[in-house]
Amino acid sequence: MFSKRMMVTVGAMVMIVLYLMVFSFAYLRKSSIEDAATRTALLFAAPFQATFSHSIGFIEDIWTHYFYLVSVSKENNALKNALAACREQNNACRETAMANARLRALVGLKEKSPYQMSAAEVIAKDPSPWYKTVVINKGGDDGIAAGFPVVVPEGVAGYVVSAGKNSAKVLLIIDRNSAVDALVQRTRARGLVQGMAGGVAGGLCRFDYALRKLDIRVGDTVVTSGFDGIYPKGFRVGSISKIVRRNAGLFQEVEVTPYADFTKIEEVMILHTRSLDGEGDGAGDALNKTDTAE
Amino acid sequence: MHFFVYLVFAVLLICMQTTLMPALPDWFAHYDLLIPLVVYLTLFRASTGILPVIIISGVLMDLLSGGGGYIICFLLIFISFRHTTGYFHFKNHVLFLMVVVLAVVMENFIFNVVLSFQLHTVNFSFVSARIFLVQLFWAVMSGPFFYRLYYHVFTEIDQLITGGIREKA
């Protein structure tokens, strides 16, 4: 019925399609081949993306710094007021920090060493609306490696999933493939912050595995727990925006709105939670050692 | 030579897709700029260099994206519509527009299947419906523009490279 040649061709095509299907799905791509391919793709695409990004930034700069000057005076007054309030708050924080240092010294607690940080610029975003990753302009040459957490002033942004020579791919916390071990700051209720972007709810996260009995309220701040081995302890993730407690079930359904605005993310900070020569095994472990020492 | 021209186009579009489109408001940002190119190459261009460009574009998009599915989508578009002009015996912007719309439907279906596998549930919500409708809107609105653009650009390039027409017979 079918010629031998046709059978071989169809067989080969099926093999190729199966291979490509496996190769396509990110959650199945965990091999070193995939990582090398991603690094090569970043190496190839990043210079073009950086050029495009800078050109767009230049045009945006002209727009925002020239055409929007009309509202600058009003904004300036508002900012001056906000700055005055911040100065007062800063002074209070400094007092608290000094008191904290004195008390820590009094009870003999060790200081947690802050991590080395690198600033990076976002040069590209995910081509698909269904996934949330960004490409930054720092890579292996700048000491960046896969697994380094990425933060913005407002809170946690994500972590480096693949680092090329001069660029790296960052998985944002709102991507559904992302999971952050977290705590509710007020009650220390533990759960897993998982992204919901890509079709369910853009820019939001779920706080999974929070037991029904745990005291969680709308407006509570969620911070990283440090137990996942990626994010250091105590970084702000978001605030609780919705809670549903059903009659049945072990867990409550909790929604978290991240503090970081991922639609406007331009610059990020990368935390060097471990040295590239293998010293230190991630933020969680480092912090656990500190906690044990304490 | 045509392979490199197509590849340059694809890389330019990928750069635009990852840098320019996210800078635009959400209302523009969701449309995949590669689809019109893949459809145009599939429908109207001679086979030399098309398939490798489609595969490279798909792989590059998959590697730059946090997920995957582009390579499957582009290959399915190629396999499904390669002989369409042969059946309909006409080549114009209406056919192009129809196939672009079908390709957008196909792409969204594939991504939803992939996401449903990841979620272990059917991925349907108001947000996903909006993403789909925005893409359909832009497919319809920009289809004729992309058709004219590619027609003129590739005709000019044909003249420059071979001095003749490289269009599919």
Image: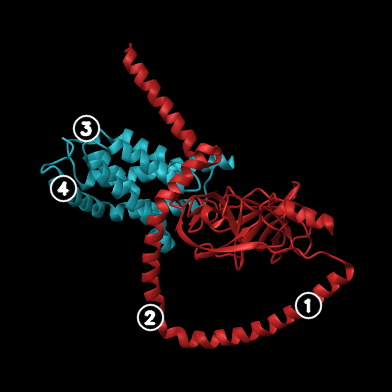
Chain colours: A red, B cyan
Q: Amino acid at mark 4?
A: Thr
Q: Are marks 4 and 3 on the same chain?
A: yes
Q: Are marks 3 and 1 on the same chain?
A: no
- Residue at x 37% of width, y 56% of height: A48
For disc 2, the marked residue is A66
Point out residue B135 in the picture as x, y percentages from the top left corner.
Answer: 38, 52
Question: Is B62 on the left or on the right of A94, as rendered?
Answer: left
N-terminal of the two: label 4 or label 3? 3
Point out residue B39 in the picture as x, y percentages from the top left corner.
Answer: 29, 43
Q: Amino acid at mark 1?
A: Met
For disc 4, the marked residue is B155
- Local SS, label 1: helix
For disc 1, the marked residue is A98
Q: Nearer the viewer, residue A124 or B97?
A: A124
- Marks 1 and 4, Cα distance to the nearest angstrom? 72 Å
Q: Amino acid at mark 2?
A: Tyr
Question: Is A157 on the left or on the right of A22, as rendered?
Answer: right
